[in-house]
Amino acid sequence: MNAMRRTAFALLAVLYVAVPAALGSNNYLMGLVVSSLIVAGVAVAWALLGNLGGMVSFGHAAFFGVGGYASALLTMKLGIPVLLAIPLAGLVAVLFSVAMLPALRLSGPYFALAILAYAQIFRILATEMEFLTHGSGGISQIPVLPTIAGFDLSSRTGQFLLLLTLLAAFLAAYDAIRRSHYGIALRAMHDSEDATRVVGVNSVLLKSWMLFVSAFMTGVIGAVNAHVINFLEPDYAFSGIWSVLPIVAAIFGGYRTVTGPAIGAVVIYLVDQLVFKALVSTGHQIILGSVLALMILFAPDGLLPLLRNALRRMRGASHA
Amino acid sequence: MSELVLQALYSGLLVGGVYALIALGLALTFGTMRVINLAHGELVLLAAYMAYMVESRLQLNPVFAVPLAVLVACTCSALVYLLVDRIRKNRELNSLMLTFAIGIVITNAVLLIFSGDVRSTGSPFMQDAVQLGPLFSMKSELGAFIISLVLVFALWQWLSRSWYGRAVRAVSSNRDAAKLMGINPARTELISFIVAGALAACAGVALYSSSVVHPALGHALTVKAFIITVLAGVGSVPGVLAAALLLGVTEAMTVTLWSSALQELVGMTLFLVVLLVLPNGLFGTARRRG
Amino acid sequence: MLELANVTVRFGGLTAVQDISFRMGGDQVVGLVGPNGAGKTTLFNVISGLVRPASGSRVLFAGGDITRLPLHQRARLGLGRSFQIPQPMHELTVRENLIVAQRFGAGRVDPRKIDRILELMDLTDQAERDAANGLALQELKRLEVAKALATEPKLLLLDEVLAGLETVAKRAFMAKLRELHETLGLGILIIEHDIETISSLCHRVAVLDFGQLIADGTPGEVFSNPDVIRSYTGAEPVVENAGVGHA
């Protein structure tokens, strides 16, 4: 395991240096990479709830939108510094997720669709509360990310480094939770909830925590996105795409793994933007839909575990 | 004011009839297979665009699109079933994601083929006004409502009287016991999906004839159908009809008395309240979702 | 330690447990017997919190009313139970099963104690196996008890842990239960069919039939009670006894 962690750190260090060095001069590509990391952040948060909490959500756009709006309003109306507003926005998303706690009692499909309903309700509220959100006209000129110690976080490279750091922190937190006693109990709850509760595990509390952690991560990413894009409108901030892309990405990468969803997100997003979009400009989501359908049908555990197994088999063959 | 309210009530009822038709298909497949077909609204959408195609290419009244729409929607519905049936692991959730994905594919296929423009019938015959006392509607709206009611009633009778109806109930309450009774569950499920496809086809043509359609509508219809299914509770055709009419009227009233932007909010809120507070829906027999 | 007062359970129109009042001390080993469907497991489910009894029923444990207490809090109060059909926590190893039970049921982590429980229940060699897929039925039954022990209970509810064991293994298991009772001062309420086993293990026997408590006393008293013999052997037509005639 230690070897794996060392590899992860090494890989991270390489990414920190190599990506800006290779793509830094290409604003367009760097922008795509930044967007892919945003999707990756939501995908990790989605997979954490799905894998540890055992709850599939169809409405992570709810947290993404709330996070974005919260951070925009905190910085613009209250003058709170951007880097402080971002974690606060994560907490606001947690606050909104409290409204979803009753849904935790619902079984799988009902929970998934209840969260979808919440996302729609939040979007409509954002449209209707014009005094706060400027309604469907949206909020423009959201402050950019600041310059810290002479380093401009609002540059594409700065955005990339901030998001990569956040993503690494999310993954580390996810992994730590998964290995903790809470993680073990959560794992046990998937198929044997009664047996787990009867030895003293408060399953509702544990699931609530996973919902909060997932909402926080998604809210933070939504906030960063608001300061990267500098513009928000309800139909964009709460767009179904923020619910769909993470699902496709996480299923593609393997939602029962820690790194799978993040890698899946980067791959899916970049391929979608660079290849699919070039092939079919409107309606390129048809390919995302097809990928999701094919994954569920043929490799529901994701490509990453599939590749790992194939690799193991090849190694086994070469040893023989 | 009261006239406005009365008119809203009337329009809401008319729309509610079509909602019932859409929701029944979803409720039927959900009842037999315990699978929520998140592509169901997209089947309706597909049928609506078949009507558009027949009208715009062949200059025919959209009603003549029914056979084509039935063919397309039933085929797609059967395909959905065959794909869902392949899922072995964690069927409840994986089928949800699979049908969700199929919905995305259909919506974007429609977008690719027919563009994102809003479409509605150009037939003057369909758009003629009909007056019922102080109440107005288009001929097509009233027609769609009546046809919907007839189909809902027919389905209800079929489900409660025919051998197939009994098979559906047997399969949905206990699959293994149904097998022992000589019922082939797979066939029963397939028939449910095909019938759901036919209902979706009629609903789609009715929708195109009486309203406007665009690619994003499919997802919204799925959500509405699911809201109605949850409101109705599982296992009651009259319940679905009542819930659909209730949703239609509530939406129309919200638009008239409040604002059109809040139309969706009311449906969603109703949905959550029922989901979280009434585990058996408004009209359903006992069955918990917890 | 444990007290049931007028406990009734209805499933739809069916009354599974009817007006049972019962108390036992933490220093007792009590057998719960009765024919299949008599309501024994339902009663366990009421005590451990899986089934809610009808209104008017009261369950008291360790001096407090736990009738409405959630499942997990009862475990923390010191109620440990095993399931008749073993329910290992899936996706976990045997050791992880015990870790979860100890961490959440007893509120602390003590690896040495887990080793001791594994040893006591003869599961040391199976510790790292997948609990749901890697164990034989008898091992699963021992894991049931081990999980309950890991929560550091004051009272153990054991649902047919001895059933299906051959004589030697059964004796050994019984010796273990006795040891637990004596060394840890653990109260045990055990569901068991075999009269001989009950007689040698328990100080006291309670008999359920058609959801009612028809006898309660020392094994000697209970097993010579004509009502019990009738319900057990079915020597006389059981139908006429249905729900009535025992009062």
Image (tube, coloured by chain):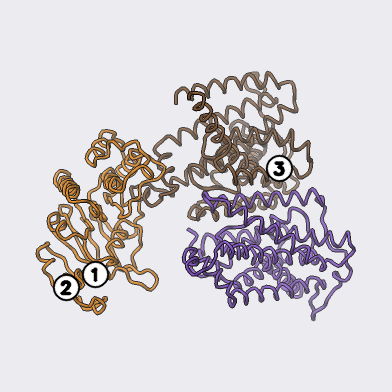
Measured as percent of width and height from the top left, residue C221 is found at 10, 66
Q: What residue lies at 73% left-to-right and 27% top-to-bottom? A: A29
> Do the CB atoms of the residues marked 2 and 3 lie less than 8 Å apart?
no
Q: Residues within 10 Å of mark 2 (few under 14, many from 20)?
A: some
> Do the CB atoms of the residues marked 2 and 1 lie less than 8 Å apart?
yes
Q: The chain drawn brown is chain what?
A: A
Residue designated by label 1: C209
Q: Residue furthest bottom?
A: B133
Judging depth in this view, the residue of A77 and B249 nearest the camera is B249
Measured as percent of width and height from the top left, residue C82 is found at 29, 51
Q: The chain drawn purple is chain what?
A: B
Q: In terms of sequence position, does the residue under pointer 2 or pointer 1 come before the other? A: 1
Question: In this rendering, would B191 be left or right of C49?
Answer: right
Q: What residue lies at 84% left-to-right and 59% top-to-bottom? A: B53
Q: Does mark 1 fall on the same chain as mark 2?
A: yes
Residue designated by label 3: A287
Question: Label 3, label 1: how many angstroms apart (C-alpha)?
Answer: 63 Å
Q: Is residue C157 visible?
A: no
